[in-house]
Image: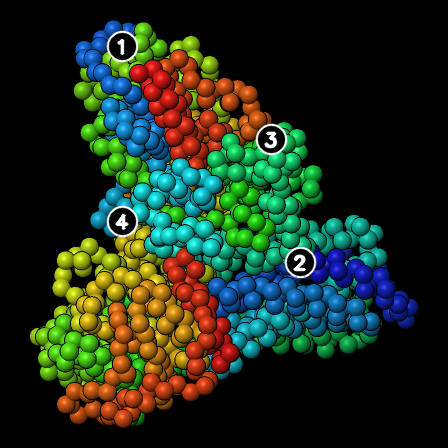
Amino acid sequence: MRGTRRELLATFLGTAVAAGCRRRAPEASWDVDLAPDFSERAHRYLRPPASAVAGAVTEEVRCRVLVVGGGVTGLTAAWTLGRAGQGDVVVLELGDAAGGTASYGQTEASAYPYAAHYVPAPTDENGDLVALLEEMGLVEGRGPEGIEWAEEALCATPKERVFHNGVWQPGLLPRLGETAAEAEELARFEAEVARWIIYRDADGRRAFTLPLAHGSDAPEVRALDELSFAEWLDRHGFRSPRIRWYAEYGCRDDFGASLADTSAYFGLHYLCARTPGPEDESAEFLTWPEGNGRVVKHLVSRVGAARIRAKQVVLQVAPVEGGAAVVAVDGESGVTRRYRAERVIFALPSYVRRHVVPGAPAYAPTYAPWLVANVHLSRRPRYYGSEVAWDNVIYDSRSLGYVVATHQSGPRVGPTVWTWYLPLIGEAKAEREKLFALDAREASDLVVAELDRTHIGLQAALRRVELRRWGHGMVRPEPGTRFSRERAQAALPFGPIHFAHTDLSGVALIEEAVFHGVRAAREVLAALGSGA
Amino acid sequence: MSTEAGEGAAAPEGAAPEVSAEPRPSDAVSGPAVLVAVFTIGTCGLIYELLAGTLASYVLGDSVFQFSTIIGVYLFAMGVGAWLSGFVAKDVVARFIEIEVAVALVGGTSAAVLFASFARVSFFSIVLYGLVFVIGTLVGLEIPLLMRILKDQYDLKDLISRVLTVDYLGALVASLAFPIFVVPKLGLVRGAFVVGALNAVVAVWCTHLLKGALRRPGRVWFLRAEAYLTLALLIVGIAYSDTVTTWSEDALYADPVVFAKTTPYQRLVVTQGRSSYQLYINGALQLASADEHRYHEALVHPVMAVARARAGGTGARRVLVLGGGDGLAVRELLEHPGLESVTLVDLDPTMTELARSFPLFVRQNRGSLLDPRVTVVNADAFVWIGAPERATEPRYDAVVVDFPDPSSFSLGKLYTRRFYRMLKRVVSDDGAVVVQATSPMYARRAFWCVATTMEAAGFTTRAYHTAVPSFGEWGYILAAPGAFEVPSWLPDAPLKFLTPETMASLFVLSADMARVPAEVNRLNNQVLVGYHEADWARWN
Ligand SMILES: Cc1cc2nc3c(=O)[nH]c(=O)nc-3n(C[C@H](O)[C@H](O)[C@H](O)COP(=O)(O)OP(=O)(O)OC[C@H]3O[C@@H](n4cnc5c(N)ncnc54)[C@H](O)[C@@H]3O)c2cc1C
């Protein structure tokens, strides 16, 4: 990136942040780490024709089921197989450890997430996810109001605050300076959302469910998927900047997408799916210092670390006589191995299919790039306004703000880690290029300028900024995604290869990751059962 | 930001009868210049609201509830202002200028007034909301009046859109200027004076700009004098802002400050009067040496007696104190002969160091923290009690929990079911626990919420109270993993307050402190902070 710091800030975070940034304090200093992107590891090997690499195979490995990809989906698939007694499973993962977009880091001060940081507490309708969380010891009992979750895992109050007009304000929607007209429009907006929460189709199905697959496909629900959320808001006359902001915040947060690029179906899904009734609160969040890394830790311990092979670049997956063959190269030693399995669960993002599974139906949705920074602080900076919360949202920035890793169980003073999120919601390819053109210093400047503007004495407390770029961080649920035939077909098995990844739902959510992991594992179990 | 006030204003205006005797203001008025005034008004109005919100959170601590109330009051007041504008029938221009002056005066001095009046806690809320209401009303009056002044200048549609756009722009500038300039560069008190002065300058300017539109142009000198006077006052305010700030902070404390330090954890202030000294944490009184013995004897001896009774007559040997960094609870503990060790966990090293070496404190706690049986740990109790090491250490026979009141969420965490569950794991099965639980009278629901929460964590509880003149009626929850009787045993030590008879009487609660239902305080709801704030608000 060229240009001044102010231009950089304006490009990535918007003009308000650029205008408000302070100078770098001369005496302040901190380390910056820009983590290598694992896709570089993959590209190195994927670029030469796969057949050339395949020719270099030096080792053969056999197992009954091979899981390709060690994100939540792949791990859940392996976990499901293990629970059903199928233990002859190997998981291949590109990264230095399993986890994918739910990986985590750890310092003396705290564990912290590299991307996914919470699980919305599911209801018993989502039995598979509940079973996983129950196995983690998170269910204390069941009462009249449903599942009683372990208190320490439920996001502690205060859950969120928002920086607007120079002050931190409680809640997500800033109310200070609100006009009566805006308040009225908000009430109308909430009523419209409530209408969709209580909606039931002729078969009694809700419009929005988790997993998605259980939801209604009635014509009026389908119609929502045909327009963008921006169009939907226009049609209903929701013009207040605050409501537009609120609606777009949800799209940026959950999908890395703008209002214009989000299907109205998914815009409403975000607002409705986790709220049982119009009078109810939205589901609480389960969260841990390491975010969804806690789920990954559990899955890894159940699957068995020995079954998971990290730093493996999967190059090719192909049906062969009696099963499937997978070629993978060890990213460290360069050794190329061929795996023979009866069944393969392909739990990589769908866009790599084209390179890795020749002949399978293609599916290449759009993915939002993300920049995530873990900001390591030696102490807590001060601020004006409402008490620091778990999620600290910044209203007039393109970033989402930050989440505090020590919020749940850490000390209320002293060192901490903040995880700061920036979804790049513009045209995906251009944004990706912009993101990867950033050097470490520039990327850290973005975070620091923004947090400095919203706190007092941040620079003096700052020790390290650790940055992660997620080139294909989240699949974007663009209009047409929910009822896309292409998407439905992409989830069907291709011979002995079973597909599973959250992007097969058109959204990146742990509920969907678990759903597809379990589904694919069940398909495999059924096939193995009948084949044996 | 005053969009609604503006639109709302159009209606009463339309209904108001035309006063033909008045000069037609707009003939003599430059439209664009007046729009500049609108712009300033928009900017200043929002800044006052932001100042009040920020200041409230600054002096009252992290307050969720204050914030929304301020917004509500301000919005309501703007509506009232717009409505009132309908009653301004005569000499709109003069009224407008006067309102402008009034906004400058009230808004400009608001931060100083709030700071200063905070010391007189008994009516602070009234001052805070009163000021917000007055400013909101005045700001709400301005735009409709201006619309009327300008109404012949533009046609109505155009007028509304212009005024609202300019007003909106003003608000936008405010939202940028406030965080970037006003707060960091000027501070709250000076910032308010500066913004007020700006308002006053606009008022002065308006006396020139709108002179020709006045019903009695001869009286312009009067308006001008008002505006200049206000401006002068505010400029003096700007010059003396620092003095105002220090003076109002000093006024917080009745006695001279002998020690003050802002640690990374809290602000500690010690004041000394003729016969007593006081410790304040974040502006809240923590102890007064004149009557702290009542508080600490009542805190410590009952739990020690229960632990003794439950252990079949053996006194507690291992005792844990959470909070209580002043060493006064430990002083009482050391009166118990069988005591072998005390672990004191307090967040703030400055506090425990003060207790060990500040002569006033050492005299008061009789050097308790220097006793070889005492180990001081500086850690966050929530983290310390949940640490895995706790599971392997021997349990405690008695635990004294003496945290500040749950006035913020970070303190509220220390009163949750989760915390008490962890606490239960470090208490021996025949041990006992006591928790300072705020006032059963001033914060009755909060007090009983602590009991309810401890019960939800598996404790059996008994509530008791004592009168501490500096604080008022104060309360504690005594608890144990199993049943226990009201204690009556006291150590053979020269106590100033407790006798076996008084001890029994502490467990008798009058009707106005009797149990009320309350929700369990959980990490994910933190209801206690809300109860505490709401309950105390009724007494302030
Ligand atoms: C910044 C960010 C924040 C998020 N926050 C949340 C949140 O708070 N809550 C939530 O529910 N969801 C969140 N998500 C969505 C999250 O992606 C899903 O919840 C879930 O973790 C997806 O898991 P997955 O296994 O389907 O996909 P992935 O995590 O993408 O897993 C795919 C795995 O395949 C590996 N891989 C790729 N190519 C190869 C190859 N050639 N060879 C071998 N391995 C390969 C990858 O390294 C990766 O581990 C977030 C996503 C991002 C990017």
Can you identify the residue that label 4 sits on? A110
Which amino acid lies under the numbered mark 2 shown in the image of this protein?
Ala
Q: Nearer the viewer, mark 3 or mark 1?
A: 3
Q: Is mark 1 within 8 Å of ligand 1?
A: no
Label 4: element kind: loop
Q: Secondary structure at mark 2?
A: helix
| Mark 1 crowdedness (10 Å alpha carbons): few <14, some 14-19, many ≥20 | some
Q: Secondary structure at mark 1?
A: helix
Residue nearest the viewer, comparing A242 with B97:
A242
Q: Chain ID for label 2?
A: A
Binning the other alpha carbons within 10 Å of mark 2 as few (below 14), some (14 to 19) or many (20 upward) gives: some
Of the two numbered discs 2 and 3 in the rendering, the one whose residue sits closer to the viewer? 3
For image coordinates 15% across by 84% down, the residue present is B335
Q: Where B445 falls versus B37 (above or below)?
A: below
Quadrant where the C terminus of chain A is found in the figure = top left
Task: Give me the chain letter of mark 3.
Answer: A
Q: Say whether marks 1 and 4 touch (CB < 8 Å).
A: no
Per the image, the residue denoted by label 3 is: A217
Amino acid at pointer 1 = Val
Q: Give the residue drawn at x 22%, y 27%.
A: A307
On whether disc 2 and disc 3 are found on a single subunit, the reply is yes
Direction from residue A335 to residue B460 in the image, left or right: right
Marks 1 & 2, CB-CB < 8 Å contact: no
Q: Amino acid at mark 3?
A: Asp
Instruction: Write down the residue under mark 1.
Output: A53
Question: In the image, which is nearer the foreground, mark 4 or mark 2?
Answer: 4
Q: In the rendered structure, are the residues bearing label 3 and label 1 in contact, judged by CB atoms less than 8 Å apart?
A: no
Residue B333 falls left or right of residue A225: left
